[in-house]
Image (cartoon, rainbow, N blue to C red):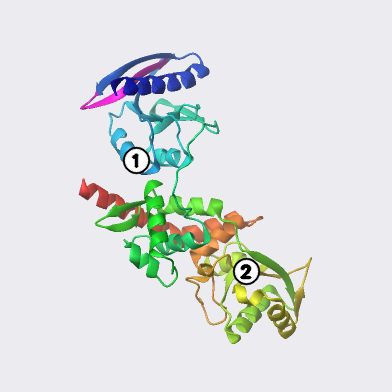
Amino acid sequence: MVNIEARLVQEAENALRRVLDELGGLDVRSDRGQRTGDKECDVLMQVTHGGTQFGIALEARSRITPQTAVALCERVRRLPDHLVPMVYAPVISPRVAEIAEQFGVGYVDQAGNCRLRSAGHGILIDRRGYKAAARPVQGVADVFSPKSSRIVRAMLGQPARGWQVRELAEHPDVGVAVGLVSKVKRSLLEQGYAVEHKRRLYLRDPAGLLENWAKKYSGPAEQIAMYFRGDTEAAERAVGNWCRDNAIPSALAGFSAAWRLAPEVRYSVGAVYVDSRAFDRDTLDRLGSSLGGKRAETGANLLLWRPFDRSVLAGCQALNRADPPVSSALQAYLDLRQLTGRGEEAATAVYKKHLTDPLHHAARRVEEMRHDAL
């Protein structure tokens, strides 16, 4: 065991030295197993460049998962202020790198991916994209698959709440097997998005979870471009009223939702989510003939979107009597992130107005719980 640990520490030191040597002009000296204040670190490096000198405290692990990264980063960032805290593992996943950055901790791996930042010394090294062979993790659920994302949606909808597995499974907008919730729970814990406290599941990093969902989100399952007489807002109301009268769930989406939730970006082509059962040819023909609309390859003023899952319509509500129901801020943000043009701008406006405060409040509450438990 001692030999294995010694080889790991040597491997960590060599990996960081290779990165520093490539920069050139640095004098690097290192000691192992040195005490830094009241703590011992695996490798202590002193780096000198011209008149600048700084220290690096490097902790080595054979494997760092997102779940273990949280506790490790919390520990190493408590090292003395004059040292730059860093962690090493043969493979640093993007999620682990993300967590390390959240804690202000640097990292390096065997492939050469490295982030080392010290504002006080004017240092920034950021190297990414170097490939390393990583063993796949077995039995981990994809938390962003259609059914699993119902669980994520419910938790992000009430980000400060603690959940029991059965509560999530029986939530009216979730409705999945307890076994799937258990798998998603394990994935959220292992990826560092959630923590368990007093047998309840809490989101530790709701903003990071939403961000990674947005990156993987593929948008509506189907899109049909339509042209209706009149302006876009009249078309939105007409389709919304027709859906209501025919007992078909619907909600304004995309830029149409953004304009109601955070009116900062104007638009000319609206979007409406319409329940999947309305996407058969007969129903679409009835909708078009009733409202004077037709399919349009060019010149469309309204897009009909088919949800990838029924949970897309969860949380939609009418904001005033004149408008149809509007997608939830969470759903609008996901959709806007996928849109070209000014989609990113509209997504940011919705996020700042409706999502920033509850997500940040939830994260702060979990940190307070964790500190109280220490």
- Report the residue at 45% width, 15% height from top: 26
In this rendering, the answer to whether 13 lies above or below 254 is above
Front-lying residue, 350 or 339: 339
Quarter of the image that includes the C terminus: top left
Q: Residues within 10 Å of mark 2 (few under 14, many from 20)?
A: many
Q: Residues within 10 Å of mark 1 (few under 14, many from 20)?
A: some
- Residue 116 visible: no
Quarter of the image that includes the N terminus: top left
Query: Given the image, on which type of amino acid does mark 2 rest?
Result: Arg
Residue 37 within the magenta-colored segment of the rendering:
yes
What element does badge 2 sit on? strand
Which of the marked residues, 1 or 2, is nearer the chain's N terminus? 1
Residue topped by disc 1? 68
Label 1 to label 2: alpha-carbon separation: 39 Å
- Residue 305 visible: yes
Front-lying residue, 331 or 269: 331
**What span is colored magenta in the figure?**
36-48
